[in-house]
Image (cartoon, rainbow, N blue to C red):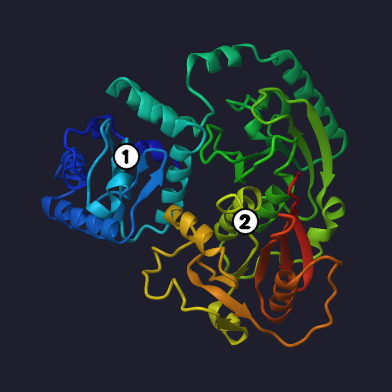
Amino acid sequence: MRLKRFLSKSRIIDIKSDSLESALQELMDTIPARVLSDAQKKKTLENILERERNMTTYLGNGICMPHTRIPGLKQKYIFAVGRCPNGLTFNSSTADIYGKTRTLFLLISDEKVDSYLNVLNTISRSFTENKIAERLGMSQSLKEFSSILERAFDSGSRNDGEDHVHAKRNSIDEKTTALIMRSAAKIAKVSNCNAILLQGDVFDEIPDLSRFFGDQKIIVMSERAALPVPDAWDIINVRTFSSERFSQLKSAIIIGMTRSILKITDRICCVGGIKDSNLADSVIVLDISKNFSDIFSQKNLLPENIKPEVLERVIDLATELSVEGREGKPVGCIFVLGNDAELKPHLKQLILNPFNGYKPEDRNILNPFMSETVKEYSLIDGAFIIDENGIMVSAGTLIHTPDFKLHLPGGLGARHAAAYSISLMTNCIAIVVSSSTGYITMFRKGQIIPIYEKKS
């Protein structure tokens, strides 16, 4: 979805107020009555303030993203953005958080829109990654602030928007990249490849590949939430915490399979290089059925009814926990994705369920404001249970299944045994982050699928 069409320059302003409530009113005053009536504005403000009292929408890095859904909106989304150079106040218990706010991003959606959480997640990633937030906070004028916003919507999050990046871009060895692309096109043709997979995070701007690959199917894997690529191309968003070539490849292929972008019979030509180098320097050919036989011996990798974006998000969070840990310490945890009713006979709470009683929308794994909550509860023994739509059912949950003869490699412990067992008993996916190695392992019907190996 092209989100820029919902961003109007007239709704990008300098906030004059110093309180959150008044600042939100300023943003809503930029929205004409034909789009949002006075009654809807009043309801919107009430909903947002109620949410902020229960759970802040401050994302960090100076970005606050209040949001709500209301009935009868005349368009799918309304965006309004304010620059807050001196921060905001709200209530005494959260004064420090709102005082750090430099960008106030208001998102309003019609309550019937299904893609609401996906859009919220995409925008939050775009404006908190790769120094976008820092540039917004340092903008010297509203014009500069607006320009940064528009570029972010146009191109997704880039590493840096300052002059020295443009100088770097001008120094790219385009001849070398072109040579690699021409070679990749020949290799793909000779190898009968079905698709070209480009490591997008190599480049500040994705190069024009049509002159090399014609109408060949092109897939871009990138951690950036939005990219300026032709509509015919596919984008697979997958996070990386390594500068190594193709470090995202296994996760990208898993996600590509679950979203039906790739098939088990596909042979793909992968083009990449060092992250942020602006130089493609590597080409490899992969036959999915052969090179990833450990992953795709299962005909149905993703259980029926589980949304692919839910699996993507869980892999994202598992990778963050693997690489970053929590408060500098290694963290091990289990995520189980499946039908709540089917899983329930094999589950028992170790503690009072911290997610009980909250609205489904507020405890959905796709909600970007859930990230810190999940990371904090990862320190608790037990598993996270997530249903097909991404709603967090419980945390601190014990998995108990009949005794199985375990077919696990040496060195795998109780978490892996529990994940192995629940994947045999139910039609689910279990993902384990090892506390000792940081490795991420997926279990599907008792099959072990290694996803990520942390590099020392």
Residue annotated with mark 2: 318
**Viewer-proximal residue among 54 and 226:** 54
> In the rendered image, is residue 78 in sight?
no
Residue annotated with mark 1: 101
Pick the quarter of the image with the N terminus.
Answer: top left
| Percent coordinates x, y for residue 22 in the rendering | 16, 44
**Viewer-proximal residue among 371 and 428:** 371
Element at badge 1?
loop
> In the rendered image, is residue 369 in sight?
yes
Residue 208, compared with residue 428, is above or below; it is above
Dot 1 amino acid type: Thr
Q: Residues within 10 Å of mark 1 (few under 14, many from 20)?
A: many
| Percent coordinates x, y for residue 394 in the rendering | 50, 73
| Percent coordinates x, y for residue 353 in the rendering | 47, 76
Dot 2 amino acid type: Ala
Q: Closer to the camera: disc 1 or disc 2?
A: 1
Task: Locate residue 51 relative to residue 439 in the image: left or right.
Answer: left
Which numbered disc, 1 or 2, marks the residue that appears first in the sequence? 1
Task: Locate residue 298 relative to residue 206 in the image: left or right.
Answer: right
Task: Locate residue 362 relative to residue 207 in the image: left or right.
Answer: left
